[in-house]
Image (cartoon, rainbow, N blue to C red):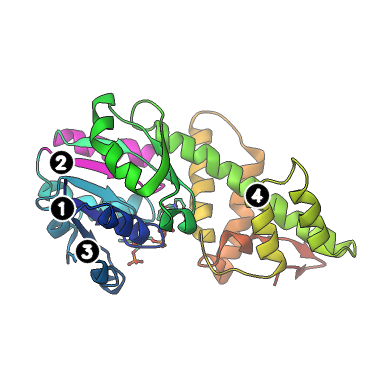
Amino acid sequence: MPSVAVLGTGRMGAPIARNLKRAGFPVTVWNRTVAKARALQDDGIEVALTPAQAASGADVLVTMLADGPSTEQAMLGDAGALDALPAEAVWIQMGTIGIDWTQRLAARAAERTLAFVDAPVSGSDGPARDAQLLILASGADELQERVEPLFGAVGRRTLWVGPAGGGSALKLVLNAWLAAITQAAAEGVALAETLGLDPQVFTQTLADLPLGAPYAVAKANAMIERQFEPGFALALAHKDVALAVAAATERGLRLPLAGVIDGIWGEIIAQGHGGQDVAAAVMTVERDGAETGA
Ligand SMILES: NC(=O)c1ccc[n+]([C@@H]2O[C@H](COP(=O)([O-])OP(=O)(O)OC[C@H]3O[C@@H](n4cnc5c(N)ncnc54)[C@H](OP(=O)(O)O)[C@@H]3O)[C@@H](O)[C@H]2O)c1
């Protein structure tokens, strides 16, 4: 079995590493906060103290870090992984880092003639634990056979969408959609409460109609219950909206709704809510200056 190094053992990286190990791959992890990586040792996973140490000798390297800058730092910073990877290794980039960062990092891999697969995922921490992620993969066709066994260990399906960058593009479109339906859920809950309805009547009705995306219904129920324990942190969701707005703007496209969400989510993150679940978006909805979701 090829050996795998996983950089980033957060909410998504830790279950991905565990599932790879469970499927029989020898796994080494690195995480900035080493205590989180050590929590995986009971599963037989090795812990490296630097990205370079994790990468050295690995057949496959997976990055599952917060964003482009943290991925660049782990790959190209002090004791970075890129130079430590064997020449025949493949780098699978799974964090949501946007199109520009993907292209920039793919170019750095190409300078080293390293194989690179852009493979962000759809599905939150639950699907990550259950190996039920949808993998939005893109890259050279000849790499598919090499990486499919790994994807099979962490996901329910892999969608191949052309050359590297395509997966990240699809991920931005999906997360702009996620943001829109989450904000719609927030406003539906607040409007129902303000009109004197039991908001659960709203979510139950929604669930009974084609209108009610299961994700939006789940987030609306979390908003009603004020459950903001993060599955997907608001700050990460906001990063994705900002990446989508920037990618659109660069290409001359204005996204009015995503632009508004970018601004109002930024405001509640500045108030300290970035570490809460994206359901905390309900705090953007105010009545007479008072948050309905606080
Ligand atoms: N959660 C979801 O539902 C979900 C679903 C699909 C895709 N994603 C994407 O997957 C990626 C990971 O998300 P997550 O939910 O696992 O996030 P998370 O739990 O917050 O983990 C983030 C990871 O990035 C590391 N990190 C952050 N800033 C860093 C820096 N400056 N230098 C080095 N490491 C840094 C963290 O290290 P520390 O532990 O030291 O902080 C941690 O390993 C993100 O791009 C996210 O948008 C998330």
91 or 259: nearer the eye?
A: 91
Q: Residue at x 44, y 47 (%)?
A: 133
Give whichever of discs 2 and 4 has the lower sequence position. Answer: 2
Give whichever of discs 4 and 3 has the lower sequence position. Answer: 3
Compute the Cα span from label 1 to label 3. 14 Å
- Please state, as top left, top right, bottom left or bottom right, where the C terminus lies in the image: bottom right
- Residue type at mark 3 is Ile
- Residue type at mark 4 is Pro
Give whichever of discs 1 and 3 has the lower sequence position. Answer: 3
Tell me, yes or no, whether the highlighted magenta stretch contains residue 133.
no
Give whichever of discs 2 and 3 has the lower sequence position. Answer: 3
Give whichever of discs 2 and 1 has the lower sequence position. Answer: 1
Q: Please name the residue that numbered disc 4 is placed on.
A: 214
The crowd level at tag 4 (other Cα within 10 Å; few <14, some 14-19, many 20+) is few
Q: Provide residue 258's location: percent of width, then percent of height.
A: 61, 43
- Residue type at mark 1 is Ala
When the figure is inspected, residue 56 is found, relative to residue 119, above or below; the finding is below
